[in-house]
Image (tube, rainbow, N blue to C red):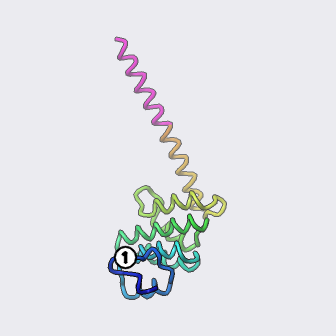
Amino acid sequence: MTADWNWETGERLLALDDPAEWDAAFERGERRLGTAAIGLAFNCPLEDASPRIVRAIQLPDVAQRGFACTAAGTAARLNGELTPELYAALRAKGPGSRSIAVNAIDDTLTFVPFRRLPMWLKCWSVWSAVRNKLDAWRLTVAYTVGDAWRAVRGHR
């Protein structure tokens, strides 16, 4: 099946199910390793895919790093957990809204039970929920004040 994987075009890399092929491609300096990491997340056990996803998250190509983060989110969706190394890689990228890992972290928070999350991600989850609630309240107050102001100005 190796002949079906096209590292040049990326064709069939989402079907990659051979961690040794990913390792060989990494050694050759192939492009699209992040794309292939998604394939590993879909087709291999988490223990086999995890070290390759972690390496892909550290690639110099920002697009491939993004795909590697997608692979981490996919692994969380499919397995309901991540390895400590994947949690560390996501933490290193940062959970903020500008982070390349924001979607992977959101997937992790959605598909991994809270009790299984590492402490830093539990704290991030709570902080994020509080921040979202405060933003909602702020917007509610702003809309209410704006509506009241328009109502008062309309009666003149």
- Looking at the image, residue 152 lies above or below residue 86: above
The residue drawn where x is 50% and y is 76% is: 40
Label 1 CA crowd tier, 10 Å (few <14, some 14–19, many 20+): some
Image location of residue 38, percent across then percent down: 47, 72
Q: In what quadrant of the picture does the C terminus appear? A: top left
Image location of residue 6, percent across then percent down: 37, 81
Q: Is residue 146 found left or right of 113 in the rendered image? A: left
**Image quarter of residue 27:** bottom left
SS assignment for the magenta stretch, majority = helix
Chain part drawn in magenta: 137-156
In the rendered image, residue 130 lying in the magenta stretch gets the answer no
Residue 131 visible somewhere in the drawing: yes
Which residue is denoted by mark 1 in the rendering? 10
* Identity, as a three-letter code, of the amino acid under mark 1: Gly
The residue drawn where x is 43% and y is 30% is: 143
Image location of residue 18, percent across then percent down: 50, 83
